[in-house]
Amino acid sequence: MNGKLDLSVIVPLYNEEGNVRELHRKIKEACEKLGRSFEIIFIDDGSRDKTVENCAGLSPLKLITFRRNFGQTAAFDAGVKNSLGEIIVMMDGDLQNDPADISLLLAEMEKGFDIIAGWRWQRKDSFSKKFFSRGANLLRKILIQDKIHDSGCSLKAYKRECFHDLDLFGEMHRFIPALLELQGYKVGEVKVSHYPRVHGVTKYNWKRAIKGFVDMISIWFWRKYANRPLHLFGGLGIVFSIVGFIILAWMAVEKIMGGSIAEKIWPLIGVFFIMIGIQLFVFGLLADILIKNYYKSQNRMNYSIKEIKES
């Protein structure tokens, strides 16, 4: 979809009946101060309260309603694919993000960045939520090695081109900057305000934390081995096979020296390691073929061209 507006503000909503009207007013006020053409997109993610009813009469507003709860990532994806803005701003619907900070993101983007992430440097959440968030951020820095402080902050701004080849699944909305950085996009960060939740309850729980961790592992794999899965699985296969051969060689020497190996488990362990090694190597070959077929079916390659100039 070709961009026809300057700005699209995308907000997923799930049981936010107490926040939608005030949130819309603040977004509209912030965008009007920017003096740019804009649209506001709310995605109702299967709310069971009066969220949809409370959106009635709000203008301008594009309201996308899901048939049931599909999750925040799906809501962001639907919002992006139904937006018209050259710059896409994402934020939460709980009024903990301040729409006035959109101007900070856009000002930072003008320095040459493709993505600007918000950093809730003074969070107003409970101790338990901040504790788990900091643990997740630590794991993210180890596995993904991105350069932002707060991947959990939904307030982010993106150039539209960032989503040309990007579909969102699982709980991956937290890791969009990391995914785009892998493709060569330039990621920046700016400190933003954060407020305590006044209406409704938090949707973050241990289930989302587990899903987020699994998605983090997926992104780690794509970051390290998406273009060369054989290096990971084949390498592990070779290591397992070598260990198995060493164990069997050790057992053979012991047998030659007159020792008894009939009641020892080591020969079985050696064979087991070799079999696991062969399976991992074959799996690596198959994964390598699948990755190549994936890129061919998408009519793309494992690189991203920013521009081509001729003179």
Image (cartoon, rainbow, N blue to C red):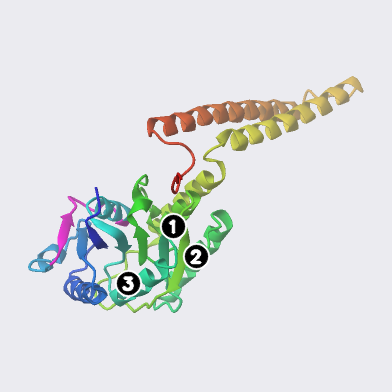
Residue type highlighted by circle 1: Pro
Question: How many residues crowd mark 3 within 10 Å: few (<14), some (14–19), many (20+)?
Answer: many
Q: Secondary structure at mark 1?
A: helix
Q: Is residue 233 above or below residue 97?
A: above
Camera-near label (3 vs 1) is 3
Residue at horizontal 76 percent and vertical 27 percent from the top: 245
* Mark 1 or 2, nearer chain start: 2
Give the residue pinned by disc 3. 102
Camera-near label (3 vs 2) is 3
Residue at horizontal 32 percent and vertical 68 percent from the top: 202
Give 203 or 299, whichever is nearer the viewer: 299
Residue type highlighted by circle 3: Ile
* Mark 3 or 1, nearer chain start: 3
* Mark 3 or 2, nearer chain start: 3
In the rendered image, the residue lying farthest to the front is 311
Give the residue pinned by disc 2. 148
Secondary structure predominantly adopted by residues drawn in magenta: loop
Q: Position of residue 65 (x, y in %)?
A: 17, 55
Q: Which residues are magenta?
A: 60-72
Q: Secondary structure at mark 3?
A: helix
Q: Is residue 141 visible?
A: yes
Give the spatial CA distance, label 3 vs label 2.
18 Å
Are the residues at dot 3 and dot 1 in contact (C-beta closer than 8 Å)? Answer: no
Give 137 or 259, whichever is nearer the viewer: 137
Residue 177 shows which numbered tag? 1
On the rendered structure, is 74 left or right of 265?
A: left
Examine the structure image and report whether residue 66 is included in the region drawn in magenta. yes
Q: Position of residue 36 (x, y in %)?
A: 24, 69
